[in-house]
Image (spheres, helix red, strand yellow):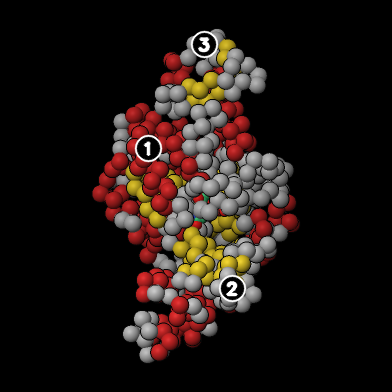
Amino acid sequence: MSDHPHFADLPSPLVSKLHAFGQEQVLRFWQELDAERRSHLARQLEAIDLELIAKLVSGNEAKPDYAALAARATAPPAVRRDGTGAAWSPADAREAGLRAIRQGRVAAVIVAGGQGTRLGFDLPKGLFPIGPLSDRTLFQCFADRLIAMREHYGVAIPLYVMTSPLTHDQTVGYWAENDFLGLPKEDVILFCQGTMPAVDAETGKLLMSDKDSLCLSPDGHGGTIKALDSAGCFEDATRRGVDLFSYIQVDNPLAALCDPDLIGHHLMAGSEMTTQVVRKRYAEEKVGNVVMIDGSVRIIEYSDLPAAAAERRNESGELSLWAGNIAVHVFDLAFLRRAVASSDALPFHHASKVTPYLNDEGEIVQPAEPNSIKFERFIFDLLPWAENAFVVEADPGKAFAPVKNADGAANDTPELARQAMVQLDRQRLQAAGVKVAAEVRVEINPRFAFTDEQLAAKVTAGETVTSDRYFGP
Ligand code: UTP
C-alpha cells in the first residue's frame, strides 16, 4: 500500500517513480476512480518503462547521422530478377526452397496489429474485402494460399498471426466464426503484440485516453519478435521442426508468403534474414532504401535519405541505391531467438501522430494537428544484426500491391491492388492459352489452381473469357 495518503491502493515505489519522472499527472483523477478502475490504471502504469520513455522523449538515444551514412551507402548483396548477383542459379534456389517447404521447415507469419488509420476501415485490416470478384478478405486470400500450398506440397504450414489490443478480439472472433478460414485450427496461432504509451509532443507527458487509461498504441511491427517469443511461438515452431519464418504484412495481397524462390535464395546465401525488394522507379520514391553500409545491410527511410545519395547512379546508369523495401522477409528462427534476447537490437522510432486525449478537466480533446509522439519499433532494423543478410529482387507486378489508403487517393488503394491482382491472374490465364477480353476482370483462387500447370490442366486453351469470372475452389 502507498505511503502517499492520496494514492491509497497504489504501490508507493510507483508513485515515487512517477514523481521522479515528472509523470504524476496520470494520477490526477485517482480520487474519482473506484477500486476496479484504480487497479486498471495501476496495471498499465506498472507495465511501462518510465526510464525508457524519459530517454526516448529527451532524444538522448543515439541518432544515426544519415547524411554521413548515406554517403557511404552502396547497393546491398542481391540477386536480381534476371538471376545475376548470385553464385547459384534461380533453379537451384527454387529447388532448395521447395525442399525446405516439403520438409516442414517453414512457418508463415502475418502481422496485422496496425491501426490502419489511412485506410479508414472500421474493422481490422485483415478483414478488408480485397478479392476483385470474390470479395475475399485479405486474411482469406492468405489462408487460401496456405491451404493450396499444404495440399500441393503435402505438408503442414503453421500460421502465426499477430494482432494488437486494437485488433485482437475482432480478429480472433473472425477466424473462429469462419472455421479458421479452412485451415486446421491447431495450425493457426493468433497472438497479441505489446503497446507503447503516447506522449504529448511539447511536454513529453504521458497522455490519457480515459481517467483510468493511458493512450497506448501498438509498439510497431518490430514488436513482432518479442510478441512471437512471449506467446510461445518459438517453442511451438521448434516442436514442429520449423526453423524458417516467412514474414509478411497483412496489407499486401500479393505478398510472397512462403515463396519457394525467396526461401531458396535465403538458404543458398546462408543468410539469417533475407528481404524481398523491388527496384525503385525513381530516386525520391517513398520506400525504404535497402542499402549496404560498412559491411552491414540496413534500411534508410526515404525521409532520411539525402537527395544526393538518392540520385547517385552506377556505371550502367541505374540508381546506385535501387532496392525498395516491400516488407517481405525470411528469418532463421535461431536469429530471431538471438535478437529477442538482445533488448537493444531494435531502436524505437518517433512518429508524430494525432492522438485524442483527456485534458485536465477530464474532457476528450480531438486535435486537428499531430499533437503526440508515438514510439514504434520496425522489423527491418534487424537487418544489420543478421549474418549474410541478403536481398532478392521481385517483379512488383507479382509481389507488391499495398493496401494503405482509401480509394480516391493517388496510390496504394484497394482499387489499385485489385487491378494488380486481376492483371496477374489475366497473365496466368493467357500463359495457359486462355484469352481474356479487354475490360474483363478475372480472379483465380489458388485453391482452384496453385501452379501454372494445374491452371493449364483446368482451363480450355483457346477459350475467350468475355465476362468477369472468378475461378474459385
Ligand atoms: P503500417 O505501418 O503501414 O501501418 O503497417 P497500418 O497500421 O497498417 O496503417 P496506418 O499507418 O495506421 O494507416 C504495415 C503493416 O504492419 C502491421 C500492420 O498491420 C500492417 O500489416 N503493423 C504495424 C503491426 O502489426 N503492428 C504495428 O504496431 C504496426
Disc 1 target residue:
178
Cα separation, mark 3 vs mark 2, equals 67 Å
In the rendered view, does 112 fall on the left or right side of 319?
left
The location of residue 6, given as percent across then percent down, is 43, 87
Secondary structure under tag 1 reads loop
Question: Residue at left 55%, top 23%?
Answer: 442
Check disc 3 and give the amino acid type. Answer: Ala
Disc 2 target residue:
359
Q: Which of marks 3 and 2 is nearer the N terminus?
A: 2
> Could you classify mark 1 by the number of other residues whose Cα lies within 10 Å: few (under 14), some (14-19), or many (20 or more)?
few
Q: Is residue 100 visible?
A: no
The location of residue 193, given as percent across then percent down, is 42, 58
Disc 3 target residue:
461
Mark 3 CB in 8 Å range of ligand 1? no
22 vs 245, nearest the viewer: 22
Which tag is nearer the camera, tag 3 or tag 2? 2
The location of residue 228, given as percent across then percent down, is 37, 55
Q: Which of marks 3 and 1 is nearer the N terminus?
A: 1
